[in-house]
Image (cartoon, rainbow, N blue to C red):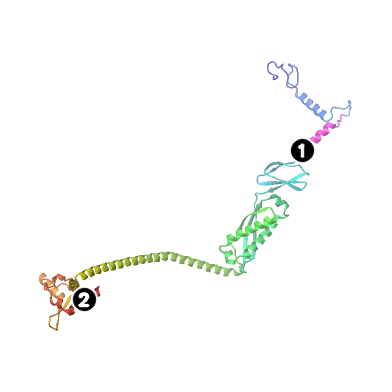
Amino acid sequence: MAWNEPGGGKRDPWGGSGGDQGPPDLDEVVRNIQKKLGGLFGGGRRGGSSSGSSLPGKNGVIAIVVVALLLWLASGFYVVEPAERGVVLRFGAFKSVAGPGLNWRWPTPIETHEIVNVDEFSSFRRKAQMLTKDENIVDVELTVQSRVQDPVDYLFQDAHPNVTLRAATETAVREVVGRSELDFIMTEGRSRIAADIKKRIAELMKRYRTGLEVTSVNMQPAKPPEQVKAAFDDAIKAREDKERLENEADAYAKEIVPKARGAAARRREDAKAYKAQVIARAEGETARFLSVLQQYEAAPEVTRERMYIDTIEDVMKRSRKVLMDADGGGNLTLLPLDKLIGRSRAARTGGAPSSPSSAPISALSTRRPAPVRRLDRGRDVSRERSRSLR
């Protein structure tokens, strides 16, 4: 029950028992505290001595020791930032690695700690003249960037890890450049050489246990020595001209080759079409010949006479001049049909004679020269011409 609640007897929380007392005096409270502290450190004055001095007793010494011990233990707290790692040493030997945050260790001289920044990047530049595989000298410049990967190895395995990193870089560059040719280094091989250098440095750092990690190796364009720079510039210009001409040739080839392939394909298709046409024509001629042969075998005389007549008719269609031989006579008569047809047409139309080429066959005389059928020589000539036409 609280002191100020009903039925609480109006007890004073400051130690008074009477309900009628007021708030305690502040001076009285201070004096009570001083008395308690005085009792803790040796009590009051001895036997009414007038000297007024007091010496700490046994309890006071214990209190001092406890306070000092607490302060000593409190000195073991330390803070590690997020980008740092704390390495704890016990009597100078490695004990553990502390992560970011508030950490505690036994105070000195039992344990100590060292802070290592593992997210800080450090870089250095290296420039030197190297000898290539084809015994040429080239100026190489590169930048190496690294950071601490293992704080324990960084502190205890190598006395000077940064110096070791520089020496390993020198070794790796000479090794990689020494097995590469000059043209490869100065043209398309720069990125590959930088990757090989980084890989070689990482192997050496792992072997030496420096605790450092190589994050990047940036290689600048390689340059020839100043004494031969003009000759190298001419060589580079010639190489560029060669590449330009090769590109132009490739472009021309890409343009002309499809056209040639298209023309070849077209000719092949034309050849196939011509082949099919010739075969079809030959098959048609064969079929016609076989049909004529079948009729000839059925009626040889009639078929022979019909073939002769058809041949003479076909020949006469294309001829504008006719030679006639009368029975029992030795003279040949020339009939200029083209002129006769032109004159007869001009007489009918009353105009100028038409060209011989335009004269139709129907304009010929209706009288068919009967001796033509009976002429052995004309029949032989007609047969020869029929064979040649076939």
The three-letter code of the residue at mark 1 reads Leu
Q: Is residue 69 magenta?
A: yes
Furthest residue toward front: 298
Which comes sooner in the sequence, label 1 or label 2?
Answer: 1
- Residue 268's spot in the image, x, y percent? 36, 66
Give the label on residue 71, or none.
1
- Dot 2, how many residues are within 10 Å of its Cα: few (below 14), some (14-19), or many (20+)? some
| Labels 1, 2: front one | 2
* Quadrant of the rendered image containing residue 17: top right
Give residue 383's mark.
2
- The residue at 28%/67% (across/down) is 283
Q: Which residues are magenta?
A: 52-73
Residue 27 picture quarter = top right
- Quarter holding the N terminus is top right
Q: Quadrant of the C terminus?
A: bottom left
Can you give x and y, in whole percent of width and height, for residue 7 in the image? 69, 15
Q: Considering depth in this image, is 350 or 374 the residue closer to the camera?
A: 374
